[in-house]
Amino acid sequence: MQTNQILALFCGTLLVLGLIAFFLGRAKAARVRAAGTSMHAQPDQYAWFSVLSTAGPAIAVGVVGAFAMLLLGAEIPTLYLLAASLVVGCAGLAMGIAMVRPDFHARKAIESVIRFFLAGAALISIFTTFGILISIVGEAIRFFQMQSFWDFITGTTWNPGASFLEAAGRAEEGASAAQFGSIPLFAGTFMITAIAMLVAIPVGLLSAIYMAEFAPQRVRTLAKPVLEVLAGIPTVVYGFFAAITVAPLIVSVAGFFGIDASFNNALAPGVVMGIMIIPFISSLSDDVINSVPDSMRQGSLALGMTKGETIRDVVVPAALPGIISASLLAVSRALGETMIVVMAAGMRPNLTANPFEDMTTVTVRIVAALTGDQEFASAETLSAFALGLVLFVVTLSLNLVSVIMIRRFREKYRINNL
Amino acid sequence: MSQSFDEISAQLRRRHRKSARLKWISMGALGLAGLFLVLFFTDMMIKGLPAFQQAQVQVEVDYSERASQLPLAAVQEDVRPLVSRGYLRLIPGRMDDNPELLGTTRMEWVLADGQVDQYLKGHHSRLSASEQEVVDRLQAEGRAELRFNTTFFSNGDSKMPELAGIASAAMGTVLTLLVTLAVSFPIGVMTAVYLEEFAPDNRVTQLIEININNLAAIPSILFGLLGLAIFINFFGVPRSSPVVGGLTLALMTLPVIIIATRTALRSVPDSIRHAAFGVGCSRWQVVRDHVLPLALPGIMTGSIIGLAQAMGETAPLIIVGMVAFIPDVTSSFTEAATVLPAQIFTWAGEPDRAFIEKTSGGILVLLAVLITLNATAVVLRKKFERRW
């Protein structure tokens, strides 16, 4: 039998068993109540308790068995496992029905189970973080067993080309040894991020200032959702836009000024990424500027400052922690952005300061390493995880710093909802 | 040091001018952002709208014995290069399905080759001069024209641009999002309910909270690495399938749903909880019967927004292999599938110019769906917004 057939059979049987438990439990409770004994809970609650006591152990056995097979490599025939799980389910059913007694607090029992499940769901987010960490660190360690960590951090040549020959045990056939020096990738990433920030921070911040300080209410209610449209456009679409429209535009404009630009220049993905990030910065800064207490503006205006001076010398400095926090989050977003650079930046690791040349980024190389046709254990595939690890560490620290900044701002002005 | 009245008023004028300048500059920044938006949409429209039209030609189709062996023989030699090869390939099958066709000759509107399509739309095409003449003649006779492109919506991917469509990607998107929703919605709501209504304020709770905020800010490609290492390599979920894509996206969507649900739960006033407790409800009964129903509109808006985000996501799906070439419409959760953004990505990599049009067409469809989803969320929020 196929796995999903077995699964369907299992679920079907469990469903039937649960239904039986429900009706038996309710019938017994109703009988007891009809006999005139007052009970601690409603018949339906006893019924649900019976269902839980049936399904809970049965599912637990199935899950434990499945994990034993996956983690410990134990060989348990699937049918045996299912049979065992159903037997345990039947035992649970019998026990559940037996526990339907007037002095039993069925509601409390159910609720502690529910609470347990809710807490379990909350733990999944922690598991996800650990999952990311474990999967990335585990594979990255395998990579660093093959390649030196020091070369990865300080090397200036990224040339994984020959690694598939090494993986096949034919290293001597390669023209040159595979080299994993990540500096050009990070240089490219930071260059594109810097360009994006040069676009996003001034435009985003100034838009926020306009919306928070100058704009009439009507403009505000209209502008904010319209700006959010920019944020809702999928990044693959931005990537296409950057590659098909913006990059040729930049090449022809640069050509007009006599500059030789590559079609995979760093400017196109940078500018488009900046556009993508504008609403992110503007809406966060708008919130922060709005939560600067009005008394500060009034004080400044009362001293004879103009509106512009109030904004420049009072409001923006007061909101600075929040603005910096927004900018840091935006930087972390730009560092991790993938589709725009995959589609519009180059593939060639290139250590240069000229934004008109092609460059590649960390995320581009991650995608390239994992969509190639190497086997999974090759150094090139695993290098994706090493790059991912660095990306994880950098973005995580940026996020943490920005959280600390915003918390400081919040404490300073005692704001609750930011 | 004293200043004359004139000096002071001049200084004041300068300061007010500066203030006004800030106003205009900041207004310009907002305008610039709006301009980007307009530019972007116009560009996509200009590039993408032609994809909804496709050239068709009226030719004589000869359902002969020979055509069932050699489909190319079904049309006359002079128009043969103008007809889509994909269409011709289907002719023997149609004759098997419908034996009456055998031996008849009919005038039929058929799908034209992609190059004819490009030529009729006024783009550069690879048609030879003589072929162009034939097309011109057919067009003058009213036997070649651009019609609404149904193939684009009914076909899967193809290497022939005239046959490439979004049907399989749309189906893949639906299946993937079903998995995403089925996983992230219950877990997200349960997490939020636990954190808002049940959790004690201790270290573990704080850890979970920090974690969720962090997850929301982790680059999406790292979720792809997680999906690859854990779901595919460890749990053995089939690569490229809607299950693995959906699970990966679910973990990404989870923080969005949790944060939105928490906000919705928090906006339900405590008086309602007190009243329910007062009549003897247990904590779970209060949540299930009173708090959750009142918070539901907020939860729905959050989930729709989360789903819209997941729908536009590509990077993690590329990592788990959902960029496969899928010509047939996927029907199962474990088969290889592709999604709309991934299809767009694949087409964007095709060298043929006709695919730029397809890509932009796919983008227009994707944007239409996304804007509809977001608008629904906004309308829901407006409709159910209430001040307690």
Image (cartoon, grey):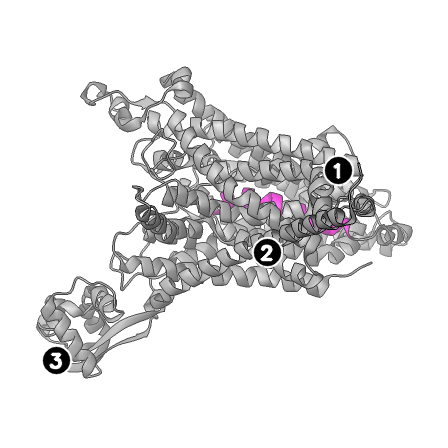
Same chain, labels 3 and 2: yes
Residue B385 colored in magenta in the image = no
Q: Residue B161 carries which label?
A: none
On the rendered structure, is A21 left or right of A3? right
Q: What residue type is labelled 1?
A: Arg
Q: Mark 3 lies on which chain?
A: B
Secondary element under disc 1, as helix, strand or loop, is helix
- Which residue is under mark 3? B103
Secondary element under disc 3, as helix, strand or loop, is loop
Residue A158 placement: quadrant: top left
Instruction: Select label 3 or label 2 by which is in front.
Output: 2
Image location of residue B196, percent across then percent down: 75, 43
Q: How crowded is mark 2: few (under 14 residues within 10 Å), some or many (20 or more)?
A: many
What is the CA distance from the residue labelled 3 to the residue labelled 2? 55 Å
Q: Can residue B59 be seen in this view?
A: no
Which one is nearer the viewer's eye here, A269 or B187? Answer: A269
Query: Residues in magenta?
Result: B246-267
- Which residue is under mark 1? A410
- Please tell me whether residue A36 is drawn above or below residue B212 in the rendered image: below
What is the CA distance from the residue labelled 2 to the residue labelled 1? 29 Å
- Which residue is under mark 2? B304
Q: Is residue A123 visible?
A: yes
In contact (CB < 8 Å): disc 1 and disc 3: no
